[in-house]
Amino acid sequence: MAKVSFEQIKGFVFDLDGVITDTSLYHTKAWHQLADKLDVTWSKELEDGLKGISRMDSLEMILKAGHKENDYTHDEKVALATEKNTNYVNEISKMTPENILPGIKAFLDDLRANGYQIALASASKNGPTVLKNLELTDYFPKIVDPASLSKGKPDPEIYTKGAELLGLAPETCIGVEDAAAGIEAINAANEVSVGIGDATLLKDADVRFDNTAEMTLANIKKAMA
């Protein structure tokens, strides 16, 4: 990756879950509800396996865990996945600004005050709804539409589109992620990657912080020096 100086950065492209808020617990609750309905035993292994994969792939994993993968037609599976999403949307409707991760609101205020452009690059179709409930919609005038994507992370497409929406060259953007696949996507898009979380998991991030509270413009500038 062509390294740039902090002074060349003009935009930030954010993942949503694990970076701005934590919606994984709501996904888990909704999948758990469906597993119970299907009489599939819930386990920590199953819960961990569902993280970061698509809705239909998640459903298939649950069905396989209960040896029920051949019990439903394609249309029935689509209906089950839709039911899960309805449960999830019902759960996230209860979210408030209290669910914003530590330091993120102040960081967004700082970005806006300093003239940085901001976009959302989440694979979740519910991203706009979550932002609305967190009262952060105004901070994200540009949102990548997941329906417009042909490939998921770790493919760089979502981050490339984020830069395009901002009208910026990728190398002048910073991408923010909490997952290894996301960091891989940012790096492949030729953007500067900022990882939030475990050092081993995010070893390929250009800049890394243990948690969202540590992510400030001053700390990013220091890390890029």
Image (cartoon, helix red, strand yellow):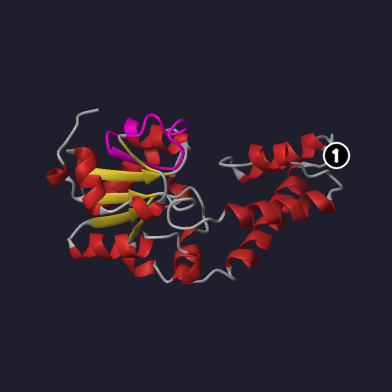
**Boundaries of the magenta span:** 187-205
Task: Judge left or right: residue 49 versus residue 71.
Answer: left
Q: Position of residue 1 (x, y in %)?
A: 25, 28
Q: Position of residue 128 (x, y in %)?
A: 46, 62
Q: Position of residue 194 (x, y in %)?
A: 33, 42
Q: Is residue 198 magenta?
A: yes
Res 60 visible: no
Q: Position of residue 162 (x, y in %)?
A: 32, 48
Q: Is residue 140 above or below residue 3?
A: below
Question: Where is mark 1, residue-wise?
Answer: 71
Q: Secondary structure at mark 1?
A: loop
Q: Nearer the viewer, residue 150 or 19?
A: 19
Q: Nearer the viewer, residue 225 or 24?
A: 225
Q: Quadrant of residue 223?
A: top left
Tell me what residue is drawn at x 40 percent, y 52 percent: 212
For the C terminus, which image quadrant?
top left
Q: Is residue 206 above or below residue 40?
A: above
Q: Is residue 5 above or below residue 32?
A: above
